[in-house]
Image (tube, coloured by chain):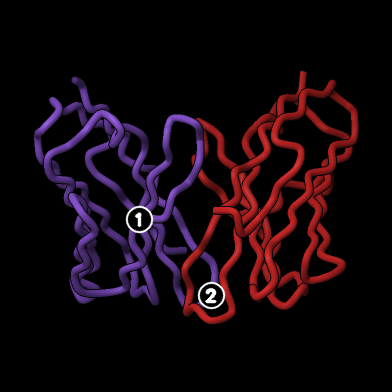
């Protein structure tokens, strides 16, 4: 769905480095979600925002992970320091204002931590 | 939290065959979605179906909320239908919980 742009699409980094993933949703949404997908754990919700405010971050694995949404058109997910077990595809998703709950996904950012 | 179970976990079909995928959930839901994750990893919306039946071409979906299940029916399968099919449910908490998916392989 072109309604959300994620960057970078692919990132390879070394253990201990800081990783920042970015998400730019289209205007007209009110909720934004960060999901992680791995073979072992499937699709997991990490955190979601409603009107730019974090509502539920219970899925954030540990303090190394943080997410921000400084405005309605930009969000970041940061991992510092990164570890090999953080390797996954990270998806950003949103719900449109006029909908009751349909979720739309970006194309994801594939992270590999060596 | 709510549990979402999808069956079967894996399915292999010959092109042209029909199939039914199932999604069972453990509690009341506000809405339910079906997604197709293609071999490139993209998550494509198939249906937003809190209840009732919807059809889109060769695909149709039915959700019976009172019985806590949804089914996705694929008719005349094609190789491009291959991928993983996910069911996701949304409760009052506002967030969606995904099942583990059904991996479909359609052979020519």
Q: Nearer the viewer, residue A19 or A57?
A: A19
Q: Is residue A43 left or right of residue A23?
A: left
Residue depicted at 50% across the width and 35% down the height: B41
Residue at position x 19%, y 64% in the image: B62
Q: x, y percentage for residue A96?
A: 57, 73
Identity of the residue drawn at 59% across and 54% down:
A2
Find numbered disc 2 in the image and state the secondary structure of the residue it sits on: loop
Q: Secondary structure at mark 1?
A: strand
Residue A75 screen position, x and y as percent: 79, 58
In the image, which lettered chain appears red? A
Task: Name the image quarter holding residue A54.
Answer: bottom right
Q: Position of residue B11 (x, y in %)?
A: 21, 31
| Figure disc tally | 2
Front-most of residues B69 and B41: B41
Q: Position of residue B91 (x, y in %)?
A: 45, 73
Q: In the image, A37: left or right of A92?
A: left
Colour representing chain B: purple
Q: Which residue is mark 1?
A: B46
Q: Residues within 10 Å of mark 2 (few under 14, many from 20)?
A: few
Few, some or many residues within 10 Å of mark 1 (<14, 14–19, 20+): some
| Chain under numbered label 1 | B
Q: Give residue B93's mark.
A: 2
What's the residue at 41%, 55% (across, down)? B45
């Amino acid at each position: 769905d072109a309604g959300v742009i994620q960057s970078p699409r692919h990132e390879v980094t070394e253990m201990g480095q800081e990783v920042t993933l970015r998400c730019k949703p289209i205007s007209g949404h009110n909720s934004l979600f960060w999901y992680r997908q791995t073979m072992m754990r499937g699709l997991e919700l990490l955190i979601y925002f409603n009107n730019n405010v974090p509502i539920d971050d219970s899925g954030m694995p540990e303090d190394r992970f943080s997410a921000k949404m400084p405005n309605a058109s930009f969000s970041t997910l940061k991992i510092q320091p990164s570890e090999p077990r953080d390797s996954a595809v990270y998806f950003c998703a949103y719900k449109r204002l006029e909908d009751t709950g349909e979720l739309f996904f970006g194309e994801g950012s594939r992270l590999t931590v060596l | 939290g709510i549990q979402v179970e999808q069956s079967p976990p894996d399915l292999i079909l010959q092109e042209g065959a029909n199939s039914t995928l199932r999604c069972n959930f453990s509690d009341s839901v506000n809405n339910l979605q079906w997604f197709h994750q293609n071999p490139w990893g993209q998550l494509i919306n198939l249906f937003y179906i809190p209840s009732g039946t919807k059809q889109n071409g060769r695909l149709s979906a039915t959700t019976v909320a009172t019985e806590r299940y949804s089914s996705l029916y694929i008719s005349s399968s094609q190789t491009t239908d291959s991928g993983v099919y996910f069911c996701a449910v949304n409760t009052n908490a506002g967030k969606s919980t995904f099942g583990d998916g059904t991996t479909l392989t359609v052979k020519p």
